[in-house]
Amino acid sequence: MDLQPYYLPAAIAGHILAAVIWVGGMFFAYTALRPAAAKLLEAPQRLKLWRKSLASFFFWVWICIIALPATGYWIIFAHYGGMARVHWHVHVMQVIGIIMILIFLHVFFVPYMRLRKTVKQENFQVASEHLAQIRKSVGINLFLGIIVLIVAGGLRYSPM
Ligand code: HEM
């Protein structure tokens, strides 16, 4: 059986799944979990909840940040035949995608690692500061993710 005709649909499906999991997860965290946790939980419980839930979510984000460029660049080089041949929306997606990945790497290795450490030490005052830093960066990434989805999903069909 010749599987070659299925490579492109599989790459696009993997790419879109990764985008939906990453941006959808941030949307849920930002718009639903954050206000509920802030309203219902005291600092120690709230910070432990974030520490645990971010650990699970970030596992999936790692898979997404590997899958998005892997499938994206495969589509560019194997299907379109190189960067010079793609529509401008792909260039915008690539630049914003790389910025999003760098922001995630910063969040993971700096404030999230510090949040883990300070929650473990039960230093909740300092842990709150690291959580606030994560919230700001995730807010920026959510905004960028929505822009990319508009650019990738909608502007692809624009006459420009
Ligand atoms: C290094 C980063 C990325 C590269 C190189 C890349 C590349 C690509 C390419 C080549 C396509 C196919 C476009 C077409 O056939 O017209 C695509 C589609 C798409 N990308 Fe990306 N992408 C990247 C990051 C992202 C990110 C971060 C998101 C969202 C969070 C995203 C969301 C999408 C969506 C929703 C589509 C489907 C558009 C469609 O075919 O209708 N991409 N991407």
Image: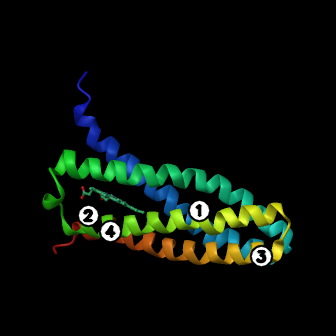
Say which residue appears at 45% left-offset and 63% top-offset: 101
**Residue 60 location (% of width, % of height):** 56, 51
Question: How far, Cα to Cα, is label 3 from label 2?
Answer: 40 Å
Q: Label 1 is placed on what type of residue?
A: Phe
Residue 41 seen: no
Q: Label 3 is placed on what type of residue?
A: Val
Of labels 1 and 3, earlier in sequence is 1
Quadrant of the rendered structure where residue 96 is? bottom left
Say which residue appears at 64% left-offset and 69% top-offset: 111
Question: How far, Cα to Cα, is label 2 from label 4?
Answer: 9 Å
Question: Within the displayed image, which quadrant is ligand 1 positioned in?
Answer: bottom left
**Residue 118 location (% of width, % of height):** 78, 66
Q: Label 2 is placed on what type of residue?
A: Val
Of labels 3 and 2, earlier in sequence is 2
Q: Compared with residue 85, is residue 130 higher up or lower down, i.e. above or below?
A: below
Residue 95's disc is 4
Mark 1 neighbour density, 10 Å: few (under 14) some (14–19) many (20 or more) = few
Say which residue appears at 47% left-offset and 76% top-offset: 143
Q: Secondary structure at mark 2?
A: helix
Q: Which residue is mark 3?
A: 126
